[in-house]
Amino acid sequence: MTDAITYGSYLALDELLRLQRPQSEPEHPDELLFIVVHQASELWFKAILHDLDGLVSALEAKDAGASLWRLQRINALMRIVSAQLSALEALPPQHFAQFRTYLGTSSGSQSVQFRAIEAASGLRDVHFMHALEEHGPIADIVQRALDRPTLQDLFLRLLERSGMTIDDLYLGPGPNVLFFLAEALLEYEQQFGQWRFKHVQLVERIIGPATGGTGGTLGSRYLMKTVDQKFFPALWEVRARIFGKSRTGESA
Ligand code: HEM
């Protein structure tokens, strides 16, 4: 007879709860929180990547309803990941300084799942490719995402297949599921940007502006530049082109 499945065995809690391994000696009381927030974020990144995969399949299948459902869940997960950063706002800078040296060269910029999310969402520009190659060979999970079309490309194909253009969505007779899908993509972009901005603010709060990070970047100055990266330039362009002009035709 097989062992009964229990809460602990189903969730592999023995293993999970052994995976928080503070490096400071003597152990700094705040290092556990630092590790937990990072590990929890990586678990949510895993769930987001899973749903991004589902979103890509739904877009490829030209299923607007299923795409919208996936995207709404991804947006809910992104809000959770951002909210978690607040836990580290309660990490006083002097406490972080006391265990920072024990982190060695580890840095969030080495997060393979974060890069896979960016790649799956559509980043392909030179800065992004540089950030990818900086830490050695590109991980398989990232390469697979790079080899697929971007979310924007898939969305544009879905629109084309429905005989519509982006302009139709915003100037057409009334909102339809493709319009809500476009708005949900934009919401995703904004949620992602909000994580980036909240993270920069956290970094400045804890190590100050323009302080180098453990990953060897210029810290918050580097991170601030990433806030403007866009997954869906076409959805921003339509706003600027159609709605960004004053009545005289000048940019407002
Ligand atoms: C005490 C809190 C934190 C500090 C001081 C901090 C600091 C930094 C710094 C300075 C960088 C720039 C790269 C470098 O030079 O290291 C960075 C990048 C990054 N961090 Fe954090 N971080 C903190 C919390 C977090 C948390 C909780 C996560 C969640 C996973 C995270 C994920 C990342 C990611 C993904 C990057 C790469 C961002 C990009 O290249 O666009 N960080 N962090």
Image (cartoon, helix red, strand yellow):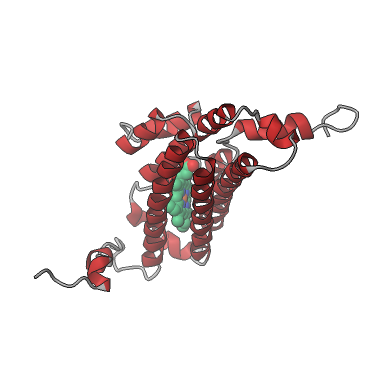
Q: Is residue 215 visible?
A: no
The residue lying at 27 percent from left, 62 percent from top is: 19
Q: Quadrant of residue 119?
A: top left
Rendered location of residue 109, percent (x, y): 42, 43
Horizontal side of residue 232 vs 49, given as left or right: right
> Looking at this rendering, what residue extends furthest in the left direction?
1
Is residue 174 in sight in this rendering?
yes
The number of discs equals 0
Residue 210 percent coordinates (x, y)? 55, 45
Where is residue 246 drawn, in percent x and y?
A: 86, 33
Left or right of 90: which side holds 103? Answer: left
Left or right, 189 with reference to 116: right
Q: In the figure, residue 100 lies in which quadrant?
A: bottom left
- Relative image position of residue 49 (x, y in whole percent): 40, 46
**Residue nearest the observer in this picture, 251 or 92:** 251
Q: Is residue 149 above or below residue 42?
A: above
Toward the viewer: 105 or 137? Answer: 137
Residue at 44% over, 61% down: 96
Q: Quadrant of the N terminus?
A: bottom left
Vertical placement of 82 versus 223: above or below?
below
Question: Which residue is drawn at the image coordinates 48% and 32% (left, top)?
Answer: 150
Q: Quadrant of the C terminus?
A: top right
60, 173: nearer the viewer: 173
Give me the residue at 69% from left, 43% from top: 175
Q: Is residue 120 above or below residue 35?
A: above
